[in-house]
Amino acid sequence: MAGAYHPPPVSRLRLDSVGMRRMEHLPWVFRISRWEDYIMKWLSLIVLVAVLVPILALSNMGCSTNAGPSWVDNLIEEFESQPVANPPLSIWRYVYEGQIVYYVPPRCCDIESTLYDANGNVLCHPDGGLTGGGDGQCRDFFEKITDAKPIWQDGRSYP
């Protein structure tokens, strides 16, 4: 068909001024004038997320200096100076009988766990030991605890 109208090829990579005006209300990542700009903006966003997510994740691991009183930080330093336990040592914060307490689970075998009050005084040994029932001074500990919050866990690997 010699007389048929064929429109000129339109580049998908360029937007006319009308298309740009339609995009003014969109966020900056969608305001593109060239395909290369589009790719660069999305790559920048992906790289930013790829860098920030691990940093934020790592900042929440391990010892948090604001996780508890200073005696807890001292206890963590003491645990880190000892050989790695199996299972790894950890410190948990709970509310027990209306007060904040800190619980260190048993390390291994017949070692008792330890329950500290908010001032670092030993309240009891809820579990572990030869019988597995601790020292018997706080038998209701596991039934009455609320608001579990992990404070610290030893991140070292067991040899």
Image (tube, rainbow, N blue to C red):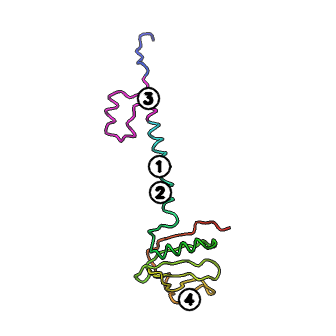
Q: Kindly give the residue lying farthest to the top in the view shown.
A: 2
Identify the magenta region: 10-37
| N-term mark: 4 or 1 | 1
Instruction: Work out whether 57 lies above or below 82.
Output: above
Q: Determine whether, in the image, residue 19 is placed left or right of residue 148.
A: left
Which of these two is toward me, 19 or 7? 19
What label does residue 135 carry, if any? Answer: 4
In the rendered structure, which amino acid carries the disc numbered 3? Leu
Q: Which residue is mark 3?
A: 13
Q: Which residue is mark 2?
A: 56
Q: CA distance from mark 4 to mark 1?
A: 50 Å
* Circles 4, 2 touching at the beta carbon (< 8 Å): no
Structural crowding at the residue carrying mark 1, measured as other residues with C-alpha within 10 Å and reported as few (<14), some (14–19) or many (≥20): few
Q: Which residue is mark 1?
A: 49
* Circles 2, 1 touching at the beta carbon (< 8 Å): no
Structural crowding at the residue carrying mark 4, measured as other residues with C-alpha within 10 Å and reported as few (<14), some (14–19) or many (≥20): some
| N-term mark: 3 or 1 | 3
Q: Quadrant of the N terminus?
A: top left
